[in-house]
Amino acid sequence: MKKVILLILFFALAFLVRYIYIQNHQGPIEQDEVTYDTSAVSLLKTGMYVDTEGMLTSYRPPLYPAFLAVIYAIFGHDYFIVRVIQAIIGAFTVCLFYLIAEKIFNRKTAVLTAVFSSFYMTFVACVNLLYTETLFSFLLAIMVYIFISREKRSLFEFCILGILAGILTLLRANALFLPLVIVFMLWIRGRNNVADTKKLYIYSLALIVCSAAVIIPWTVRNYKVQGRFVLISTNGGLNLYQGVSRSPGKIFDPGTKGEKIWAKVNSVRSETKKNDIFMQEAIKIYKTKPLFALKMLVVRFLFFWNMVDWEILGGDKINYHFLFILPFAVWGTVVGVKNNKNAAILPLLVLYFCSFVLLFPGTPRYRMPVDGYIIILGCYGILEFINRTKGKVFQVCCVGTYFLFTYFLYKYSLETKYLMKTLMEKIGLWQ
């Protein structure tokens, strides 16, 4: 009963914070939001998945526009309603983080996690945007909780996990290999039990088959539309090219419309051919400019862990919440995995999403789905740091002082950003 009351309180707190933010940040949709909205409206009116030019598309996975279309069908074409529903989803996600933290660690970690997640800047601001991340984070948290919640496994459970993995892939293509992460954790936890080896094979197969069963209908549709095999989307080539290209004075940039590659891309209508052009150009850069490509790999990695989230928070402020929790998350990972093998799923998920920067652009927005697990590890790390010695006053003062320091950087975000830019220029990462 006490847990239920806590969850209700945390849900109310998280929703209230997000609702207040929404009320004070109403505005028009922009960039990716427009694309999702256009596709959703078309799905609702014609049942066809099209781009902003009205052409059948496979450029993005379809589930988020379908999610918007359902909301529009019920409540009308109202962005405010979408944002409120995303605030509700975000509040439920906070409750899931509580349950995950409590299951893996303890109640104190869970409470601290829920409070921190309720106010976490990226989570709060993202519900106001028509982006996939809020829904993706919620479904991923459900998947993680199902996996860690029971010691005794069942075939049905892994079928559900497979279905969730497939759904997540139709939200964002980078979830495609999530079943392998779950299979890896399953074998780590069950490898010492020889009697369960046969079950491990069956559960792993069920997970992968159920995930594929969700994805295949979309792949078949793509083949009919594009005339060739497209597993999830046709934006892989652009993302690969964007990861190793930039214009002067910018970190990531797919180039200006006047560049030769854009003239070549704009000369064809087929999405798959555009994708091929970008892919070939990216491979060419890797072959002819290996040192530059290596430098861009470093840049992608740094920007994945960047505290300036220009896509969600805007470019005028830093995410001091993330800057504060990150070092404690590192400590929490070291101590947590050592004390509890179940905790390994959290850093493993972080590494999984971070691994995409090996090829594709890394931004804080792409990190958001695992920020919750960084927060869980960070909250555990804070408590472990405080509880390591009998006299806790000094440790509490250290934590408080560091928080104030990160808040100071937030208050002077522009100056902090300029300092970061200057440092990157000095070491040749910003040109």
Image: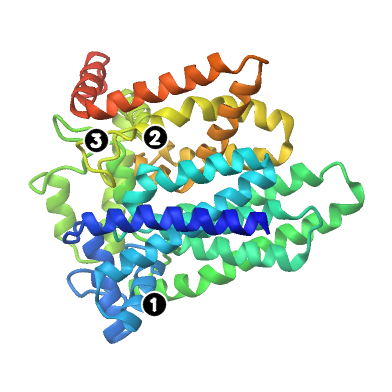
Q: Looking at the image, which residue is at 32% across and 30% down? A: 296
Quadrant of the rendered image containing residue 303: top left
Depicted 217 relative to depicted 126: above or below: below
Give the Cα separation between the discs numbered 3 and 2: 11 Å
Task: Find residue 334 and report its horizontal and vertical position in percent.
Answer: 63, 26
Q: Position of residue 371 (x, y in %)?
A: 46, 42
Residue 218 versus residue 24 in the image, above or below = below
SS at circle 1: helix
| Amino acid type at mark 3 | Lys
Marks 2 and 1, how far apart at CA:
46 Å
Where residue 197 appears, x then y in whole percent? 85, 52
Location of residue 253 by image quarter: top left
Of all residues, the one furthest to the right in this rendering is 195
Mark 2: which amino acid?
His
Q: Is residue 272 visible?
A: yes
Kindly identify which residue carries mark 2.
321
Q: Secondary structure at mark 2?
A: helix
- Percent x, y for residue 10? 51, 53
Name which residue lies at 29% across and 34% down: 308
> Which residue is tagged 3?
317
Residue in the image at 26% along x and 79% along y? 42
Q: Which residue is mark 1?
A: 224
Q: Quadrant of residue 365?
A: top left
Structural crowding at the residue carrying mark 3, measured as other residues with C-alpha within 10 Å and reported as few (<14), some (14–19) or many (≥20) = many
